[in-house]
Amino acid sequence: MKNENKNGCMWYDTDGNPIQAHAGMILCHKDTYYWYGQNMGGETDRRDTGLHRVDFIGFSCYSSTDCVHWKNEGLVLSACSEPGHPLHPDRVGERPKVLYNEQTRKFVLWFHLDSSDYFTAHAGVAVADSPTGPFRFIREISPNGYDCRDMTLFRDTDGKAYLIYSSDWNKTLRIAQLTDDFLDVNGVFSHAFPEQEREAPAIFTKNGVYYMITSGCTGWDPNNALFGTSKNIFSGWKLIGDPCTGENARQTYFGQSTYIFEKDGVHYLMLDHWKPDDLQMSGYSILPIQTEKGHLTIAFQEYTDL
């Protein structure tokens, strides 16, 4: 079905309102797709340091049966006005990712949880009985004792789940296996791309090969994406090259990677198109990924058939 929302621009829900699901992901559960992301529907605080921000509002959820028409399900995890609370509006909550755990029948949410100056660099964990929440905040942690910034979740074909996050002040990506209930790290971890300064990880596997797309660390300014491959999620990662092709490829079409999901046998890359002076109007793209002989190709499309 043709998507009426234009790639590279703001997308709108079934009520005609801007979709507030930035730096998020799409989860398929029982033939319904759920788009989670950061709600940035407030005024942008423009700072001389360049760390423009919106007070933490919470994480939104939108549902769809076709990935084209998105219904607003509201906030699934909201800010807390209690002073000193980890979810206070003066904190940072970004890049929410959700997995469903069949054993516990719970939906588990992980996200980057930080102070407004980005010095704390922790992860937050929450849990819910329903994909549309509400999620209950459980803890703020430093995964395996390391700083955690841009992150994603990945569930492998064997059911094991992993937290993948930028660490060492964005110098290194770390890969941490989660406990069977997905609520914590289990102490088994490794790293990828040391000293390469990669962030915004998005990962999938196909034909026994893991593929990870990442962004360079240039703040709000777009840069060229790179992808790496490995046959073992914990070791052997190699940076290969830029998967994007054509006009504006070296700027990742003026977007930044956030997640890869699969629909009808096709993998799609989600991009955020940041507008640092008005973050609530940052747009989105969803682009199909072509995989051939270990190489990825992602071409920009004005509209994506989903």
Image (spheres, rainbow, N blue to C red):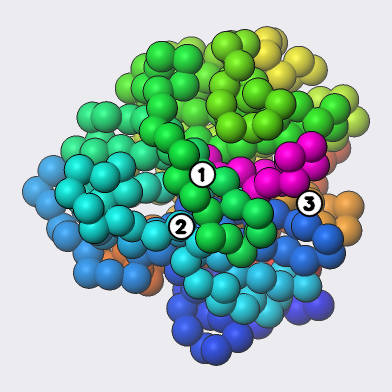
User: What percent of the width, then of the height, locates residue 13?
Assistant: 56, 80
Indicate the amino acid at tag 3: Glu
Q: Residues within 10 Å of mark 3 (few under 14, many from 20)?
A: some
Residue 131: in sight, yes or no? Answer: yes
Left or right of 137 on screen, residue 102:
right
- Residue projecting furthest to the left: 48
Distance in Å between CA atoms under marks 3 and 1: 24 Å
Which label belongs to residue 126? 1
Instruction: Give the residue drawn at x 83%, y 53%.
Output: 266
Along the line of sight, which residue is nearer the eye, 160 or 167?
160
Which type of secondary structure does the marked residue at label 2 adopt? Answer: strand
Indicate the amino acid at tag 2: Leu
Query: Residues at badges 2 and 1 in contact (C-beta under 8 Å)?
Result: yes
Along the line of sight, which residue is nearer the eye, 248 or 110?
110
Instruction: Give the residue drawn at x 58%, y 32%.
Output: 183
Q: Residues within 10 Å of mark 1 (few under 14, many from 20)?
A: some
How many labels, in total?
A: 3
Query: Residues at badges 3 and 1 in contact (C-beta under 8 Å)?
Result: no
Q: Residues within 10 Å of mark 2 (few under 14, many from 20)?
A: many
Q: Magenta stretch?
A: 99-110
User: What percent of the width, then of the height, locates residue 159?
Assistant: 81, 31
Which type of secondary structure does the marked residue at label 1 adopt? Answer: strand
Residue 275: in sight, yes or no? Answer: no
Query: Which secondary structure is most common in the magenta stretch?
Result: strand
Which type of secondary structure does the marked residue at label 3 adopt? Answer: strand
